[in-house]
Image (tube, rainbow, N blue to C red):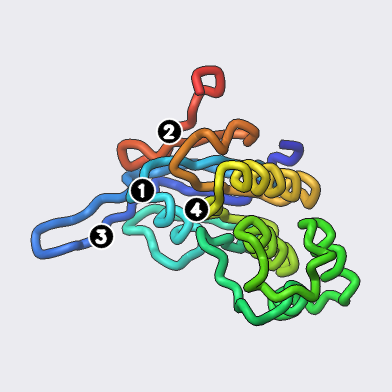
């Protein structure tokens, strides 16, 4: 972490849902934390603990019941399962995602970054699970957004592909000086990150790395 400027700040954020008459589901209570520019943050908890809800709050897709959320940079979500048109090529996927209208050389460089340049004319339907996930990351990078939210990005990958994709994602975040939040149900994928948080008791508990 080389830059201490704050990119994400939660200040006493509470999130509750009314599920039925007389019953309120509490997801977060008075949650406060900050993420600094360039940090790589791991967030873990079991299914249903609130990982996706946390990301939806950051993205502005849901509003907190109380408290404030401040975001200083643009955000891109890397979903759990790649959402890619199977009948487009890798290069066409990036052309569609190219919001800043970069030249083709930038698209080719991004494909090189994720190790898919040789497959640029290959249809998505022919790619492996790991390649599809890397293409999803490439599509996120070409948007030019500075904060990446990776929501359980290893869901359908085998163990070898999981670690390969994780290492690749961390490497890209480091090289591009991006801020990364990686949500998963296990701490096994998080040992190389700057900080690790567990969703516990409707809040975020930062783990002691020596005890992790």
Instruction: Measure the C-alpha gap from mark 3 to mark 2.
Output: 22 Å
Helix or strand or loop: what does disc 4 sit on? loop
N-terminal label among 3 and 1 = 3
Q: Earlier in the sequence, mark 1 or mark 4?
A: 1
Q: Give the residue pinned by disc 3.
A: 17
In this view, which residue lies farthest toward the front? 126
- In front: label 1 or label 4: 4
Distance CA(mark 4)–CA(mark 3) = 26 Å
Q: Secondary structure at mark 3?
A: strand
- The residue furthest left is 22
Question: Which corner quadrant holds the N terminus?
Answer: top right
Residue neighbourhood size for the residue with mark 4, other residues' Cα within 10 Å, grouped as few (<14), some (14–19), many (≥20): some
Q: Is residue 45 visible?
A: yes
Residue underneath mark 2? 205
Spatial CA span between label 3 and label 1: 17 Å
Q: Which mark is residue 47?
A: 1
Counting from the top left corner in percent of width and height, residue 194 is at: 63, 34
Q: Secondary structure at mark 1?
A: loop
| Residue in the foreground of this view, choosing between 66 and 56 | 56
Q: Is residue 75 above or below residue 101?
A: above
Disc 1 packing (10 Å; few <14; some 14–19; many ≥20): few
Q: Is 23 placed left or right of 97 in the picture?
A: left
In terms of secondary structure, where does tag 2 sit? strand
Residue 154, image x, y percentages: 54, 51
Mark 4–mark 2 Cα distance, whole angstroms, equals: 24 Å
Earlier-in-chain disc, 3 versus 2 = 3
Q: CA distance from mark 1 to mark 4?
A: 12 Å
The residue that label 4 is drawn on is 155
Q: Nearer the N terminus, badge 4 or badge 2?
A: 4
Badge 2 density bin: few <14, some 14–19, many ≥20, Cα 10 Å: some
């Amino acid at each position: 972490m080389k830059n201490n400027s704050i990119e994400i700040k939660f200040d006493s954020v509470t999130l509750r849902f009314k599920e039925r008459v007389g019953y309120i589901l509490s997801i977060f209570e008075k949650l406060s934390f900050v993420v600094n520019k360039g940090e790589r943050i791991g967030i873990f908890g079991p299914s249903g603990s609130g990982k996706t809800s946390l990301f939806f709050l950051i993205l502005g897709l849901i509003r907190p019941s109380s408290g404030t959320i401040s975001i200083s940079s643009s955000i891109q979500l890397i979903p759990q399962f790649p959402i890619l048109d199977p009948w487009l090529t890798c290069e066409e996927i990036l052309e569609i995602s190219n919001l800043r209208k970069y030249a083709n050389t930038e698209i080719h460089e991004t494909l090189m970054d994720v190790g898919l340049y040789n497959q640029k004319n290959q249809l998505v339907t022919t790619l492996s699970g790991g390649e599809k996930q890397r293409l999803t990351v490439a599509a996120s990078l070409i948007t030019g957004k500075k904060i990446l939210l990776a929501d359980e990005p290893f869901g359908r990958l085998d163990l070898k592909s999981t670690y390969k994709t994780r290492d690749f994602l961390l490497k890209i975040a480091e090289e591009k000086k991006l801020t990364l939040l990686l949500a998963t149900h296990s701490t096994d994928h998080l040992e190389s990150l700057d900080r690790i948080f567990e969703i516990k008791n409707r809040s975020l508990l930062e783990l002691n790395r020596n005890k992790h």
